Amino acid sequence: MSFLEVLYFIIPSAIFYAAPLVFTAIGGVFSERSGVVNIGLEGLMVMGAFIGIIFNLTFVDTFGSMTPWVSIVAAMIVSGIFAIMHAVATISFRADQTISGVAINMLGVAIALFSVKMIYGKGQTDYIQERFVRFDIPFLSDIPVLGPMFFKDVYSTSILAFIVAIGAWFVIYKTPFGLRLRAVGEHPMAADTMGVNVTKMRYIAVILSGMLAGVGGAVYAQAISGEFSHTTINGQGFMALAAMIFGKWHPLGALGAALFFGFAQALSIIGGQIPYIDQIPSYYLHILPYVLTILAVAGFIGKAHAPKASGVPYIKGKR
Amino acid sequence: MPNRVVNILVPVISVILGLLVGAVVMVVSGYDPIAGYSALWNGIFGDSYTIGETIRQITPYLLSGLAVAFAFRTGLFNIGVEGQLLVGWFAAAYVGIAFDLPMYIHLPLAIIAAAVAGGLWAFIPGLLKAKLQVHEVIVTIMMNYIALHTTNVLTRMVANGKETTGTIKETASLKSVFFESLTDYSRLHYGIFIALAMVFVMWFILEKTTTGFELKAVGFNKNASEYAGMNVNKNIILSMVISGAFAGLAGAMEALGTFQYASVKGGFTGIGFDGIAVALLGANTPLGVVFGATLFGALKFGSLNMPNAAGIPVEIVSIVIALIIFFVACGYIIRYFLVKTNKKKEAK
């Protein structure tokens, strides 16, 4: 296999594995930028994957080839509603954000598995028939070198992931809403003094993070796993959290980090077929994202700063 | 209402709320909650075997709960108990398999190996927190996954490529013939004594030693402790290491007691994460952890009876446990209502 062929092989799979992480990590960016730590991303992703698959299996006759897309919308709505729990606990009830996130994670897995067993009488669902499929982008895929790398055999969900990441960058950095969001996460009292409704902003951000994590989960389930069981989402939510931190709480940074983690995941799965890479034990590729994240937060790869008020409930009138 | 009573009422109300919502979930999903909860009850107290197994399940919960609680007292959130437990599990199993020693050396050695492994695994986040102010939650989460992959690779190595290692030597086993005869051959083992001893150790360290005083002081107020001349960094690292050692011991309970081997794992055991629930419910005190571990250990084991006896998926208990954590975390609002209703009563 020539070097170029290796690239043609690995870059599409890296993007393929990265897409769910991108959605979820962007969700994390919204939440943390508003000052709410969301460790519950994993649980929200589980919810999204579960709803995506259930919806897909149930309504495949109604929607035909559009089913995966409708399922994503369903997953987005349900995970968004599920995230309200985290919002109520952390914003209104001043619960410890990390602990509430842990509860969300446990609850997401428990509810999903409970329902799967209730509906199907076994621990895993059937395989879905309508999946996301690959396609070639007309014209662009004919570009030499870049075409086969980025525009051939792509998933539409991968394109959507890029659009969402760039859209999130625009919203957070170029709109009044984004300015308020960041203000609330950095200095809620100052934002409040200037007339920004801190509680409302945080609620919106947490619900957005739930919706995006739901999309991430549904994309993972419908493009990669094809079914739902207790191992479908196994740490992807935490990896998305890692991507967000590694990307320094910036949407485009998170996009880059998620792509890199997708690359590591792709290598650990298909690396055996690539010369030289197959010499590296997959163990190192498995732990790479986590080690890199530790190095990133430790400041060895540029200093990362969390939003100042991240993790602190805002209590009016408290200095 | 005195503060003490409120502090006890919050977890009690949370447990009741959790069980109530669990019942609602069962009704909504078309199950009979009374049949469900009686199946749960029988799964816990049904006969001597289930009681033995319940206590067996409580054992690692005690230790993982202590691990989370101990770090909490120094103001640290150790989400990495799961990973520390895994490395402890592997270390204990490895020592149990690889060495040939008389029991009075072998067993303590295997147990200490687990504690050391867990402690070392927690040392890294502790060090990063102390020296570079890196948030321990992120690092410990990442360390969990590194532990999972690392112990899997090491287990395969020890097992010569297989998924499960051989059984540990009898000289390193916590197996109890006495308990077996008492509880109809349940897997209850002597580890429960170690776990209870550690409850005492935690109480002793925190309440009776200068180190414990310093650890708590750092948890209350870092700056004040620093000003009073305490070495904050040292205390942060120490707290994480002790917490990790407790977690490692929880792994030893599984390696030397319950399973007697190490195996390749597809995912986490959940004991470490449930330890957060245990510690939270027990308000991070040693005695509270005993109550928390007893409740969650019993619920977890008892739930295994629910699919057979009532046709209800075991996950219902996970839902209840998650809800209890959620309600305890929302303690502020429960407290608020308690104080408010109390004031009304007093006004009358």
Image: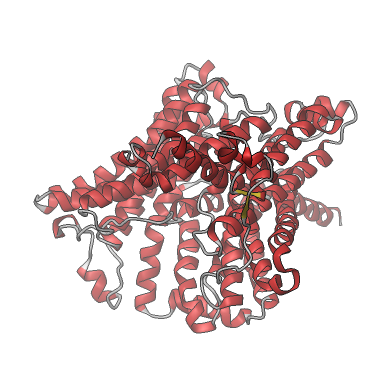
Residue drawn at 75 percent across, 73 percent down:
A62
Q: Looking at this view, name the residue that lies furthest to the right.
A: A195
Residue drawn at 70 percent across, 75 percent down:
B28
* Residue A58: image location, x then y, percent: 68, 73
Q: Number of numbered discs present?
A: 0
* Residue B118: image location, x then y, percent: 34, 41
Quadrant of the rendered structure where residue A96 is?
top right
Of B203 and A148, nearer the camera is A148
Q: Is residue A227 visible?
A: yes
User: Is residue A91 depicted above or below B232 in this figure?
Assistant: below
* Residue A140: image location, x then y, percent: 67, 39
Residue drawn at 82 percent across, 34 percent down:
A316
User: Is residue A182 depicted above or below A258 in this figure?
Assistant: above
User: Is residue A261 depicted above or below A223 in this figure?
Assistant: above
How is the protein colored in the picture? secondary structure
Of B170 and A17, nearer the camera is A17
Picture quarter with the C terminus of chain A: top right
In the rendered view, does B187 fall on the left or right side of A240? left
Of B272 and A273, nearer the camera is A273
Picture quarter with the N terminus of chain A: top left
User: Is residue A164 depicted above or below A222 in this figure?
Assistant: above
Residue drawn at 33 percent across, 59 percent down:
B192
* Residue A229: image location, x then y, percent: 52, 64
Q: Is residue B322 visible?
A: no
